Amino acid sequence: MLPDHLDVLAQAIRAITSPRLVILDPLHALLAPAVHFDSARLGQLLAELAAIAQNYAVAILAIGHLSKTRTRRLLYRARGSLQLVAAARAVHLLTADPACPGRRILSPLKSVYGPLPTPLAFHIGPGPHLTWESAPCGVAAGLVDLPDDDQSLLSDACDWLADCLSAGPCPVPDIFRNARATGLSISTLRRAKRVLGIRSLKPNATSAWFWQLRSSSPNQGAQEGGVRA
């Protein structure tokens, strides 16, 4: 769990002779719950990961997932804080080719090193073995077919909300702010709340409303509210 176990990560890198690549898959599952909603702590964590990459001469590849909510730019559909995308030196999208099930398309979305190169494609064969196409595939990232039907939006919102609340109750304002940052609409988020049976809790008269999974134990002194939060 990051940032609590950065020393464990550094120790694992030191234990390997001439390491070159560190993969965090998926990154959002490795982040401590409080970090998701704290810009300062998240920024500090990203700086510490960058220092580890520099100190040990390794590249850090963080795997993320897209929300299914349609927005103007794919970069804004990455799950989690936009700080993660902003801090990355390069961002690539890997997706299946809707016209060819065994084909994958790798599309550059961001690079600080120069102009974005043309997307590439490869096929997955037995082994598994990857066979790269010799010529660029010429498929623009924005034209890749990504699901955006209403049921997919609700399913994605349910996954996001369950992940958000997995560590315990969260303040509703924080949930709404981070949902908007990932491209989820508040109306879809409220539908996901009903599907998951999320509790609305108010610890005291002056506090914000909290949402909590039904499978969690209510906080001592919290009142389950009948007011829609």
Image (spheres, rainbow, N blue to C red):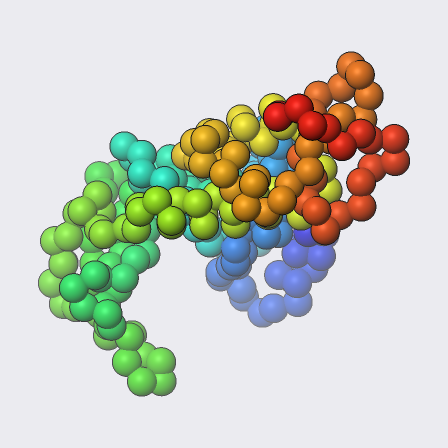
Q: Is residue 123 above or below residue 45?
A: below
Taking the view exactly as shown, the residue that stands out farthest to the top is 206
Q: Name the spot of residue 172 as percent of width and height, x first.
A: 63, 27
Left or right, residue 156 beside residue 43: left
Q: Name the spot of residue 194 as percent of width and height, x first.
A: 56, 41
Task: Give the camera-side residue of 126 and 115.
Answer: 126
Left or right, residue 217 beside residue 78: right
Q: Residue at x 35, y 80 (%)?
A: 128
Q: Name the spot of residue 148 as percent of width and height, x first.
A: 31, 46
Q: Quadrant of the C terminus?
A: top right
Quarter holding residue 202: top right
Q: Residue at x 66, y 24 (%)?
A: 227
Q: Residue at x 21, y 43 (%)?
A: 142
Task: Give the camera-side residue of 77 and 6.
Answer: 77
Q: Is residue 174 above or below residue 107?
A: above
Task: Give the camera-side residue of 19 and 33.
Answer: 33
Q: Residue at x 72, y 28 (%)?
A: 225
Left or right, residue 33 beside residue 131: right
Taking the view exactly as shown, the residue that stands out farthest to the bottom is 126
**Can residue 83 be seen at all in this image of the molecule?**
no
Q: Name the spot of residue 81 as percent of width and height, x first.
A: 51, 35
Quarter holding residue 34: top right
**Can residue 63 be seen at all in this image of the molecule?**
yes
Taking the view exactly as shown, the residue that stands out farthest to the front is 226
Total marks placed: 0
